[in-house]
Image: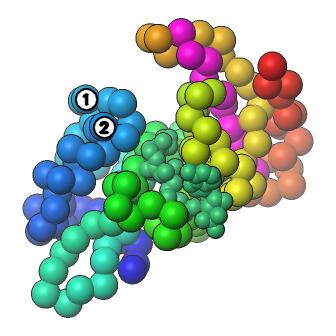
Amino acid sequence: MRVVRAASALLRELTNQEELQTEARELLGDASFELQRELERPCGGVLLALREAPQDREAAGVLSFLRVTEELHILAVAVPRAAQRRGVGRQLTECAMELARHEGANAILLEVRRDNVAARAFYASLGFFCFNVRRRYYADSVDALELVLALEPGAAARFLPAIEV
Ligand SMILES: CC(C)(COP(=O)(O)OP(=O)(O)OC[C@H]1O[C@@H](n2cnc3c(N)ncnc32)[C@H](O)[C@@H]1OP(=O)(O)O)[C@@H](O)C(=O)NCCC(=O)NCCS
């Protein structure tokens, strides 16, 4: 598997674009999630985990992001259920870290629902920690945890671990 930054042409060539988008919508609980729109966001981008199959262009996962000043914000990471727990999400996020460093960002930020136990364990395994809790942030009143991964020691000082109670 390899992770690439997607362009419109690559999206069109994906053999499982529809399936990926449909399952990503379910996994993210966001019926409006659209790969092409993620790609077209100003200062945004999409990383795709492509399966190694010479005749085929099939994606095993997707990550979308925004560049915001000296930070990279991860908007979504989705790995279809059949491909989970095989390191796809980790590879996508590590690639986002490389990209962030390459573009001069010093921290990666994201929001996760407090009740998304799997995603919280996933991000914790990559070194993210919670620096802020947005109470009752989502439409169903679940809190949002704001997580950060500092890419430089200087950036780490800007974020203090929050008490998640
Ligand atoms: C969260 C998500 C992206 C993880 O992707 P993945 O490819 O399955 O994760 P990986 O295989 O790279 O896991 C890396 C590590 O994260 C942790 N982890 C991942 N999924 C986990 C789970 N369900 N429970 C506990 N820990 C988990 C583990 O430490 C894992 O390492 P291990 O498998 O060696 O124990 C995937 O579960 C997903 O798409 N979830 C639905 C969408 C979502 O919630 N996205 C995040 C919010 S934007």
Residue 102 seen by the camera:
no
Residue 48: percent from left, percent from top:
34, 64
Name which residue lies at 66% across and 48% down.
121
- Is 128 situated left or right of 51 in this image? right
Of the 4 image quadrants, the one containing the N terminus is bottom left
Query: Which numbered circle lies on residue 31?
Result: 1
The quadrant of the picture showing ligand 1 is bottom right
Quadrant in which the C terminus is drawn:
top right
Seen at 24% across and 54% down, the residue is 20
Q: Where is residue 75 in the image (x, y as percent from the top left)?
A: 46, 40
Identify the residue at image location x=80%, y=47%.
155
Residue at image mark 2: 26
Q: Where in the figure is residue 151, as x and y percent of width and height? A: 74, 57
- First in sequence, mark 2 or 1: give its number: 2
Ligand 1 within 8 A of label 2's CB?
no
Q: Is residue 18 positioned above or below 53 on the image?
A: above
Is 122 within the magenta? no
- Residue 144 falls inside the magenta stretch: yes
The amino acid marked with disc number 2 is: Glu
